[in-house]
Amino acid sequence: MYKKKTGITGIIITIIILIALVFLSNMNIENLSYIENAFSSFVMPIQNGLTYLKNKISGNNAFFADINNLKQENEQLKSKNTQLEENLRELEIVKSENATLKEFLSLTEQYPDYTTKPAYIINKDISNYTSIFVINLGEKDGIKPNMTVISEKGLVGYVIATTQNTAKVQTIIDTATIVSATISTSRDTLLCKGTLEDKQTLIATNIPTQANLIQGDKLETSGMGGIFPKGILIGTISSVQNTKNITDRYAKITPAVDFNKIETVLVITQANK
């Protein structure tokens, strides 16, 4: 009988405590009296104990432990990901360097009649009036003014000035550059030069009256003029512009080299024949 009463008393006390907790949780802390604060301090350990017991029973403790483990694993994965990204960047650099070496080798094999030196373009100055590149070779590398500069696609230009470590290259799309060219089909000779209107187009002038220009014909250096060796591809005839006077007709030429994307070149230092 005594145990039964004690059990009922415990239940009643628990109900009163829970009701008090609900009542106090709905009040602003500023409005609590000293006695209410004291009561809250007494009750809070009990509430925390019940919460702990609930979490223990429902497995919440394991859940929070799993969260901590996941955080640690996430940090480890982030660290590994950073390392993988660094390794990937290093691999891309190596691949780029290998691609450049292969390009240089291809260039050298493509022009066996010339002694050449490979170079990187380190600066570009392209405007309406000029088109000049700076390469990473200079006087210490044997580079001199008027040496021809080529790429895998064709003619780039020629050296106009040097320092110990660099050289300036005036490209064929520069308005000051004039190249003596030969039409691949008819072998007629004409002159090519850059234009102010379009930096990706050359203009062919001084066309012989008997010359038959056909769209798609290729132009290569004639070897005349004292700078450019013979037989280097310049570009392709994209259109022929006829005029009232046949001596004034001209043609538009698309350069073989894409001067916006070019990065590596060869400087011809000597002809082998």
Image (tube, grey):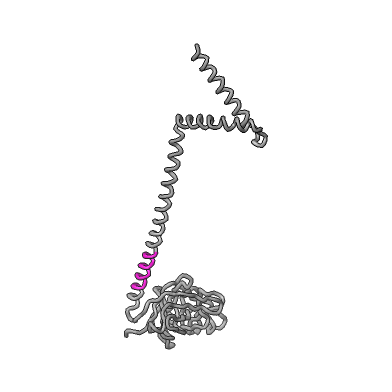
Residue 241: horizontal and vertical position, in percent? 53, 77
Closer-to-camera residue (197/38): 38
At 56% from the left and 22% from the top, the residue drawn is 13
Considering every residue shown, the one lying at the far bottom of the view is 226
Q: Which quadrant holds residue 221?
A: bottom left
At 51% from the left and 17% from the top, the residue drawn is 6
Is residue 78 a member of the stretch shown in magenta?
no
Q: Which quadrant holds residue 105?
A: bottom left
Residue 249: horizontal and vertical position, in percent? 53, 81
Query: Which residues lie in the magenta part?
Result: 93-106
Magenta region's main secondary structure?
helix
Closer-to-camera residue (191/257): 257
Q: Is residue 233 visible?
A: no
Residue 257: horizontal and vertical position, in percent? 44, 73
| Residue 142 in the figure: left or right of residue 179 | left
Is residue 97 a member of the stretch shown in magenta?
yes
